[in-house]
Image (tube, helix red, strand yellow):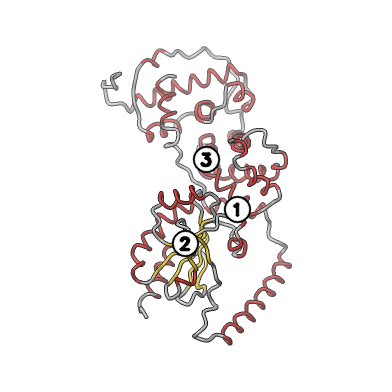
Amino acid sequence: MDNIEQLYKQHRDAMDRQSATPATWEALEQQLHPPASKKKTLWWAIAASLVIAIGLAGYFFTRTPSTNHELSEVILTSPQGEKVPLSSLKGKIVLVEFWASWSKMCTEENCYYFRPLYDEYKDKGFEIYGISVDTNKTQWVEGIERDQLSWVQVSDLLGFDSPIVKQSEITKLPTTYLLDRNGAIIAKDVNADELEEQLKKLLAHTP
Amino acid sequence: MAIDLHYQLIERCKKGNRPAQFELYSLYADAMLNTAFRILNDEEEAKDALQESFLSAFHQLHQFKHDSSFGAWLKRIVVNKSITALHRKKGRPIVSEIRDTPSNEEEATREFDATAEQAYAALHQLPDGYRTVFSLYLLEGYDHREIASILNISVSTSISQYGRAKKKLRTILLKDQPHGQHRATV
């Protein structure tokens, strides 16, 4: 092997400069699963709005301060084998994040967006409930260490077959839900700026 | 066994399972995008080729019988799509089948070093034909017989293009070396 070959073999991985973006997946997904015809979609939208409206009305009418049924009960296990109910975080602003150790997009968002925000707001009443869709415990734990994730980490290691993942209809990673102090969903898939804005607003007055 | 690595995942994708498709995509998208980019030398065109490749991979997935690794199977689709796109853009074959005198290798004796940055920049300064043959051979691991069939050229043309690509890279990289003080062989 000559000098040039050695050089390029040596730098093979370091020369990979391109990374796929969520947009490239979304464009592909559109073509793989084209949305239903417009008319059909409209009917579904109307039906869905009605269901949501009825649900919301019911929610507000039946809501009493003593109940915490807003929190859909999720109880998953930490790497240490401890059961962590999502409801145990009640009283805090919680970001529920579905992620996987093998997803580069998750690593990127965790390291560049969520970790700095977590470090800044964790003592002010913010918590992240990281639900991993990994199926291999070793990879999961290595991912947590590699990305230095110090927030709550749980999984049932069933991957995309996990009931909670199916129930939440996760089609991309990461998917996030922002919950208020009562566990009600405020927003889905917040970006870093929106999240910081929400945290500033929601954590301004500690109860 | 490496071949069985994503067996279950691929089987779920064959049934059109959306989360499984996303998982498979996430595993391979970056590597495949870089392969496409080395051939096309254009970010947007590489992304288009990536999308086209995955689309046809998912559509042809029932033909994948796990007799090779999925990565190799997918990469071949990406390479073919990228080369088709490059041909379409150029409007002519990227490597012309002209028999030329073999390139001399005398400069090969001169030792030098370069950073990943310099190596990357030099690779992307190469003409399309050189860059493609060089990448397919050294970085993607195809042999000259396979490259010849991918590019529809003769094996000897693939070999000579590869030699020329290396020579050109050496010329480009030597220009970046500090004057007269190329690395002494330690």
Q: Secondary structure at mark 2?
A: loop
* Chain identifier of the residue bearing label 3 in the image: B
Left or right of B17 in this view: A105? left
* Chain identifier of the residue bearing label 2 in the image: A
The residue indicated by pointer 3 is: B31
Question: Residue B184 sits in which quadrant?
Answer: top left
The amino acid type found where label 3 is placed reads Ala
- Asked if labels 2 and 1 touch by Cβ distance under 8 angstroms, the answer is no
Q: Which residue occupies the foreground of this view, B102 or B35?
A: B35
How many residues crowd mark 3 within 10 Å: few (<14), some (14–19), many (20+)? some
Q: Are marks 1 and 2 on the same chain?
A: yes
The residue indicated by pointer 1 is: A27
Q: Quadrant of the N terminus of chain B?
A: top right
Q: Is residue A88 above or below residue B84?
A: below
Q: Secondary structure at mark 1?
A: helix
How many residues crowd mark 2 within 10 Å: few (<14), some (14–19), many (20+)? few
The residue indicated by pointer 2 is: A82
The amino acid type found where label 1 is placed reads Ala
Residue A125 locus on image (x, y percent): 38, 72
Question: Residue A201 sits in which quadrant?
Answer: bottom left
Query: What residue is rendered at 58% in x and 17% in y?
Result: B98
Give me the C-alpha separation between circle 1 and circle 3. Answer: 18 Å
Q: Is residue B164 above or below residue B22?
A: above
